[in-house]
Image (tube, rainbow, N blue to C red):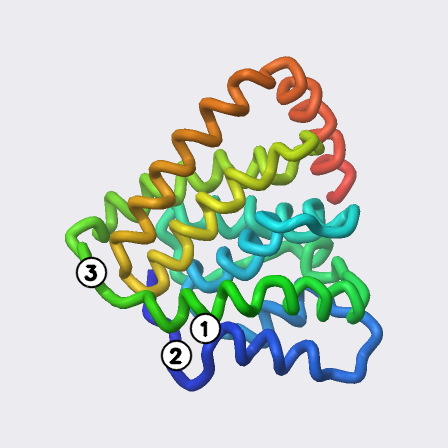
Amino acid sequence: MSEHTKAASVSELLDQIGARSGRKVSVGDLLDTFGDRAFGALMFVFAAPLVLPMPPGVSALLGAPLIFITAQWTMGRKTLWLPKALLARTMSMSDFRSLTAKLKPHLERLERRLRPRLTFMYNPMGDRLVGALCFILSLIVFLPIPFGNMLPSFAIAAFAIGGAERDGVAALVGWVTAILSIAVLALLSKAIVAAVVAFFATLVGMF
């Protein structure tokens, strides 16, 4: 993943979006604002809010872009592409401001503490392996499993912010959480199978 510009922090960019006068915020607005940001920064923005209790529909709004982002991370792409149907998805500005208000204190603490360390964990092969794991986790996040998206979202967020800052400690947290989340969700396999069927039906309907 490429390094992102230090001109403004992720939390500052979220504030800029929330200060706009529009009534809605689209996925396209988020991507336009972050521009050339690393995949890790974008993944964090989409995954981290899902760790917290969110209004209905937010999981589908943020989970769908995660699937496309992590798939492209796995393939080693440098330029992010999302289908128009996803770019056009919106949430109300009031919900967005509520979401960022919950996320911002945690994000600002992370931004102060993260730094490059244990960088040997980052290499092209390792990045693709993590990308593949995050792709699997993002599928789980998108599925309508009650309380089933919090641990996978936390793991994705940890991998994402770790990748963006080249902080191996965050990546270690991601691995531990990913293993734990998969173990827990394995106990809900029947519900997951039913949710997978619903997911693919939804995905087909988007095109």
Residue at horizontal 37 percent and vertical 73 percent from the top: 112
Measured along the vertical axis of the image, is residue 5 above or below residue 174?
below
Specify whether 187 is left or right of 167: right
Q: Which residue is mark 1?
A: 36
Q: Residue at x 54, y 80 (%)?
A: 12
- Foreground mark, 1 or 3, reads 3
Give the camera-side residue of 10 and 111: 111
- Determine the CA span between mark 2 and mark 1: 8 Å
Q: What is the spatial separation of the Cα atoms under label 3 and label 2, in whole angstroms? A: 19 Å
Separation of disc 1 and disc 3 at Cα? 23 Å
* Residue at image coords 55%, 16%: 187
Q: Given contact means CB atoms under 8 Å apart, are the residues at marks 3 and 2 in contact?
A: no
Q: Amino acid at mark 3?
A: Arg
Q: Quadrant of residue 192?
A: top right
- Labels 1 & 3 near each other (Cβ < 8 A): no
Marks 1 and 2: in contact by CB < 8 Å?
yes
Crowding at label 2, few (<14), some or many (≥20) Cα neighbours within 10 Å? few
Classify the position of the N terminus by image quarter.
bottom left
Q: Which residue is mark 2?
A: 5
Q: Secondary structure at mark 2?
A: loop
Task: State the image coordinates of residue 89 (x, y, percent, origin top left).
Answer: 75, 58
**Would you name the residue on which mark 3 appears?**
117
Asked if residue 154 is positioned above or below residue 18 in the image, the reply reads above
SS type, badge 3: loop
- Residue 166 — which label? none
Residues 120 and 188: in front is 188
The answer to which of marks 1 and 3 sits earlier in the sequence is 1
